[in-house]
Amino acid sequence: MTRPGHPDPRTQAQQAQMAAAMAGAVDLAAVKARSEAAARAQAAPPPSADAPAGTPGGAVVDVTEATFQAEVLDRSFQVPVVLDLWAEWCGPCKQLSPVLEALAVEGGGSWVLAKVDVEANPALAQGLRVQGIPAVKAVWQGQLVAEFTGAIPEEQARQFVTELVQATTGGAIPGAAAPEEADDPRLDAAEAALERGDLAAAESAYQAILAEEPDHPDAALALRQVQLFRRAEEAGPDALAAAEAAPDDVAAQTRAADYLLGTGDVDAAFDRLLDVVRRTAGEDRDQARKHLVELFAVVGDQDPRVNQARRQLTAALF
């Protein structure tokens, strides 16, 4: 629904309206926090490779516990952020860090390298579950999406960041000129329904658009998102307890996955259904597989977590 690297105000407003429509039905604390971070990122200037290394807003930044929110979480709604967790006494860190710094400058603002001294910022290291250093973790839209531990050759480091950028923004740089997209007045009815919390009316409006234009670029994804939010609303937080009480009930597991995805916990939603696929067979397995593929479509193939879960699904099936 959005051009890589160029947040679409209509889409962002639509997602906020969906979250508002769910308020009171599910716990949206995580969704609200992510929405606020996205709003701050949209208001902030894009990262610049011309900024001095280590300074805020540059392609390479030094991050502390005080600046982590702005320079990592918020920034990750503009471009992917790669965390380089290091310490002065760590020999391998001194081999890897210069490689990552050179690649970040070369990237020209398409991604940010955020350097974290684990000795000076122990709470960050603990929160990120750092087991050893150097540790590298990639953050996209507030979520950890890839990581590795230990020093690796430049070729492998380049491949890591290249695949990360291509899977997230496609290499687009925030603030770069992009063609204007014409507004579609047919979306207004759906958005008005979302504003007043009427998910059923929003679903009908998107279905009407697709009936007229099956290949509409925005309506198909919006419809899947609204349908997901409706299912999450119907499932409610009790879906998790029900799924735990009935691990062999595939329908209960799919409801729990809907609730998890509706509240922003993408990994937990995917993992729950992957577990069902691994331990079932026949119709149960096929039901879980089909539902998982539907959730992939809601999140979108541009999200690295979808690509990772697809690989896990293939391994589970074959």
Image: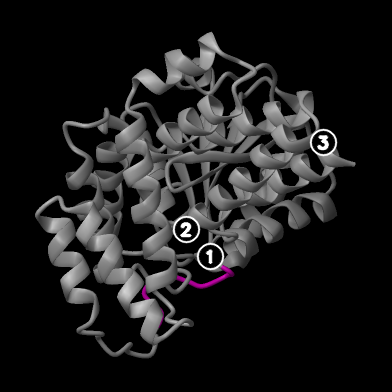
Q: Quadrant of the N terminus?
A: bottom left
User: Looking at the image, which is closer to me, 286 or 185?
Assistant: 286
Residue 111 visible here = yes
- Point out the frontmost of discs 1 and 2: 1
Check disc 3 and report its element: helix, strand or loop: helix
- Point out the frontmost of discs 2 and 3: 3
Check disc 2 and report its element: helix, strand or loop: loop
Side of 107 where 237 appears, left or right: left
- Image location (x, y in percent) of residue 252: 51, 25
**For marks 3 and 1 on the same chain, the one whose residue lies earlier in the sequence:** 1
Residue matched to label 2: 79
What's the residue type where badge 2 is placed?
Val
- The span picked out in magenta is 170-176
What's the residue type where badge 1 is placed?
Thr
Q: Are marks 1 and 2 in contact (CB under 8 Å)?
A: yes
Residue matched to label 3: 316
Q: How is the image coloured?
A: one colour
Q: Is residue 72 magenta?
A: no
x 52%, y 9%: residue: 245
- Point out the frontmost of discs 3 and 1: 3
Q: Which mark is residue 169?
A: 1
**From what the image shows, is residue 2 above or below residue 181?**
above
User: Looking at the image, which is closer to me, 199 or 311?
Assistant: 199
Badge 2 local density, few (<14 within 10 Å), some, or many (20+)? many
> Residue 305's quadrant in the figure?
top right
**For marks 2 and 3 on the same chain, the one whose residue lies earlier in the sequence:** 2
**For marks 1 and 2 on the same chain, the one whose residue lies earlier in the sequence:** 2
- Image location (x, y in percent) of residue 143: 48, 39
Check disc 1 and report its element: helix, strand or loop: loop
**From what the image shows, is residue 121 above or below residue 201?**
above
x 84%, y 55%: residue: 155
User: Looking at the image, which is closer to me, 175 or 60?
Assistant: 175
